[in-house]
Image: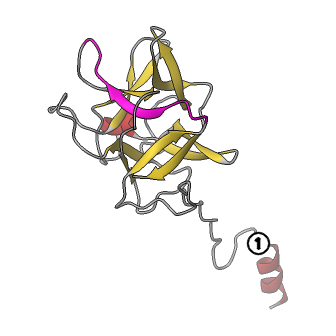
Amino acid sequence: MLVLLLLLALSSQPLLGSAKPSLDQVLDISGKKLRLDADYYIIPANGAGNIDVVSTDESCPLHIVIAKHSQGLPLRIAPVKGVIRVSTDLNIMLANSDSRCPNYSIVWKIDPFSKEETFLTTGGILGHAGSNSIHSWFKIEKYDDDYKLVYCPNVCPSCKHVCKDVGYYRYKNMEMRLALTNVPFKVKFQEA
């Protein structure tokens, strides 16, 4: 009996398992938890403008940009599992279809433009976690008192990919396109 008690006391394995701490739910600017059935504006915390989409020379897919003179577009957030929490894989998409690219998905994805630049565009895959949709998964991370968007999916453990912050890149000195960068930009969420 004494040997059994000693083995139990010295065991590194918990008897009943250990509960992992729950990740925080993402909050909007009024302090409410983001909901799956609601649309949101993603607002740059520095007030630089609002998230919008523009067509380029190729017209489709649409590029995700920060536009100074735009009301912004309502977006929908779809996590891989049930609740919108920090540090979990999720898709971000336009809340409504866009007539400029009717044959393209409204889901955001990364789109390598060159070896140095990877922009965010529409045309991604909703759900279906795996190698086919690896470019369509993002995360929301706490960043000071606000949040930041990150590309570092866990939905495909065997897939190779970079992990970078979503920031912006000034393209042709005109628009600020969302891109993978080493410098994140702070965002907030406002219910549409």
Picture coordinates of residue 69, whole percent (x, y): 43, 28
**Quadrant in the picture for residue 98:** top left
Measuring 40% from the left and 53% from the top, which residue is drawn there?
A: 80
Measuring 61% from the left and 24% from the top, which residue is drawn there?
A: 182
Above or below, 66 relative to 188: above
Judged left or right of residue 151, residue 54 is left
Above or below, 59 relative to 148: above
**Quadrant in the picture for residue 175:** top left
Above or below, 77 relative to 61: below
Secondary-structure class at tag 1: loop
Above or below, 83 relative to 114: below
Circle 1 residue: 11
Q: Amino acid at mark 1?
A: Ser
Judged left or right of residue 150, residue 59 is left
Measuring 79% from the left and 78% from the top, which residue is drawn there?
A: 7
Picture coordinates of residue 47, whole percent (x, y): 57, 35
Please report the bounds of the magenta region as a residue range: 46-57
9 magenta-colored? no
